[in-house]
Amino acid sequence: MKKQTIASIGILVFLAIFAASWVFESPILLYIASAIPMIVVPFIPDLPKNQTIRHRRSKHISLVKVRTDEQSPESVVITFKPGAIRWDARSLVLDLEELNDAIPVVQHIPEQKHAAVLTVLQHDLRITGKKNRQVAIYLPNLHDRCQSLSYELESVNRLILRMEDVYMLISPPLTGAASTAVPSSENVRLHA
C-alpha cells in the first residue's frame, strides 16, 4: 500500500475518532484520537526534493548548447546565478524536449570571471518523469565530487552536461549483440 493511501486512511480515522469523542463526550476517545497523528506522521509523503529547471521562465538560469565544429559532440552548459540552484535538493530535473529543441547552439561560451564549473558525468544522470521525458542530475554525486576541489559547491555557477551521455541513457540497451559477446562459463578455463 502506498504511503499516501496509509496517510489518507490515518487522517480519516483521526477525524472519525475525534468527531466521536466530541459527540459522545468521551475523554478516552479524545486520547486515542490524539495518539493517531504520531502513527500517521511517518506515512505522510515528503515534499518534492527535486528542482525543475525551466530556463524560459527563469531569469537566473540559462541553457546553451555548445558545439565547436560538426564533428564534436554537443554539450549543454547550464549557467546560473548564486542561489538559483537548491543544492540541498536531491536532483535537478531538465526536460528532454527543451534540451533537444529550444536551446540556442553556439560555438563557444564567453569567458566569465570567477566561473566555477562542474562537469556532469553519465553516472550523475537519471531518466525520470512520465514517459521518460526528463533527465535528472543527481546532486549528491556533484556534492561528493566537489569536496575534492578547491571551491565549494555553493560557488559553482556553471554545469556542463554532455548530450552524448543523455543519449546513452535514453537509447535502448543492446540485447542480442551484448549477449553473444560474453563468453559462456563452459568455455572459460582458469589457470593457476
Image: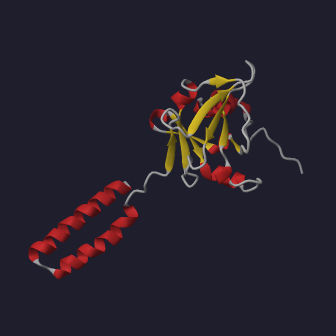
Residue 99 screen position, x and y as percent:
57, 29
Quarter of the image with the N terminus is bottom left
Total labels: the figure holds 0
In the rendered structure, the answer to whether residue 146 lies left or right of residue 16 reads right
The correct choice, above or below, for 13 with respect to 187 in the image is below
The correct choice, above or below, for 9 with respect to 125 in the image is below
Residue 101 screen position, x and y as percent:
55, 23
Question: Which residue is farthest left?
Answer: 23
Q: In which quarter of the image is residue 26?
A: bottom left
Question: Which residue is farthest right?
Answer: 192
In the rendered structure, the answer to whether residue 6 lies left or right of residue 29 reads right
Near-viewer residue (187 or 51): 51
Q: Can residue 74 be seen in this view?
A: yes
The correct choice, above or below, for 84 with respect to 100 in the image is below
Q: Can residue 174 be seen in this view?
A: no
Question: Which residue is farthest top?
Answer: 70
In the rendered structure, the answer to whether residue 84 lies left or right of residue 181 reads left
Residue 155 screen position, x and y as percent:
67, 51
In the rendered structure, the answer to whether residue 148 lies left or right of residue 15 reads right
Residue 131 screen position, x and y as percent:
46, 33
Q: In which quarter of the image is residue 121?
A: top right
Near-viewer residue (160 or 192): 160
Residue at point 72%, 31% (across, down):
110
The correct choice, above or below, for 174 with respect to 143 in the image is above
Question: Which residue is farthest bottom?
Answer: 27
Q: Coloured how? A: secondary structure
Residue at point 39%, 56% (across, down):
45
